[in-house]
Image: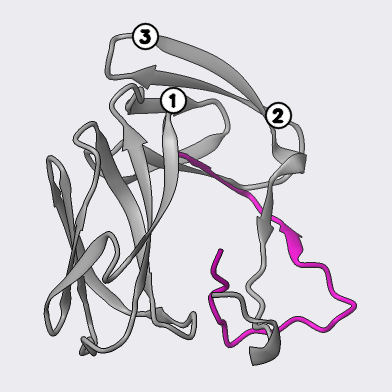
């Protein structure tokens, strides 16, 4: 597990949870968290690119790169083809160092969302073609009914308790507590 640093550090008495009016919906089915390490199951291709082999039936939708101290490295882009993931960073990679790539992969049994209808929120597709949607509400009271449509022609209706939507605030840990 890696902890990413942030410039915002809550006071020790502050909660790391905050109520929010946003809901992120990414699909239904197999979502996998996987760590790759250069020199083990990933390789540095050039001074800004890392190549990774991934299972043919999984597709990345989010990833990040950490240096050997556990610090996040800014990314330019990531691309995938069946069985591979290529990550381009906005920094120069040092071939003598080890980097960790954290990827979230969608399994091919995943139902991809094609559309969402909300009775009281504003729906935005934030990753066109990947079925990742955000619902934003004007308030945090009551409930909302969402109709979620999938790529296989099925749909489902769910009820969202708008008063129970939470987010985790970023926190910077002292170096001694950083986990890489």
Picture quadrant of residue 32: top left
> Which residue occupies 37% across, 18% down?
149
| SS for callout 3 | loop
Q: Is residue 107 above or below residue 153?
A: below
Q: Check disc 3: other Cα within 10 Å, few if <14, some if 14-19, many if 20+.
A: few
Q: Is residue 48 above or below residue 132?
A: below
Q: Quadrant of the C terminus?
A: bottom right
Q: Residue 90: give its label.
A: none
Please, what is the dominant secondary structure of the magenta stretch?
Answer: loop
Q: Which residue is mark 1?
A: 29
Q: Check disc 1: other Cα within 10 Å, few if <14, some if 14-19, many if 20+.
A: few
The Cα–Cα distance between marks 1 and 2, rounded to whole angstroms, is: 24 Å
Q: Which residue is mark 2?
A: 143
Looking at the image, tell me whether mark 3 or mark 2 is earlier in sequence order. Answer: 2
Q: Is residue 50 left or right of residue 157?
A: left
Q: Residue 154: give its label.
A: 3
| SS for callout 1 | loop
Q: Position of residue 56 (x, y in %)?
A: 19, 35
Q: Position of residue 100 (x, y in %)?
A: 38, 70
């Amino acid at each position: 597990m890696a902890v990413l640093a942030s410039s915002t550090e809550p006071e020790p008495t502050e909660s790391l949870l905050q109520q929010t009016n946003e809901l992120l919906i990414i699909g239904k089915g197999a979502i996998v968290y996987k760590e790759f390490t250069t020199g083990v199951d990933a390789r540095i291709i050039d001074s800004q690119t890392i190549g990774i082999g991934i299972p043919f039936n999984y597709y990345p939708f989010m990833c990040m790169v950490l240096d050997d101290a556990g610090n996040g490295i800014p990314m330019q882009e990531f691309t995938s083809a069946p069985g591979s993931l290529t990550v381009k960073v906005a920094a120069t990679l040092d071939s003598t160092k080890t980097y960790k790539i954290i990827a979230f992969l969608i399994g091919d049994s995943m139902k991809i969302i094609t559309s969402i209808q909300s009775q009281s929120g504003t729906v935005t597709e934030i990753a066109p073609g990947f079925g990742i949607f955000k619902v934003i509400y004007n308030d945090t009271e009551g409930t909302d009914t969402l109709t979620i449509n999938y790529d296989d022609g099925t749909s489902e209706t769910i009820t969202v308790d708008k008063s129970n939507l939470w987010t985790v605030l970023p926190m910077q840990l002292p170096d001694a507590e950083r986990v890489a």
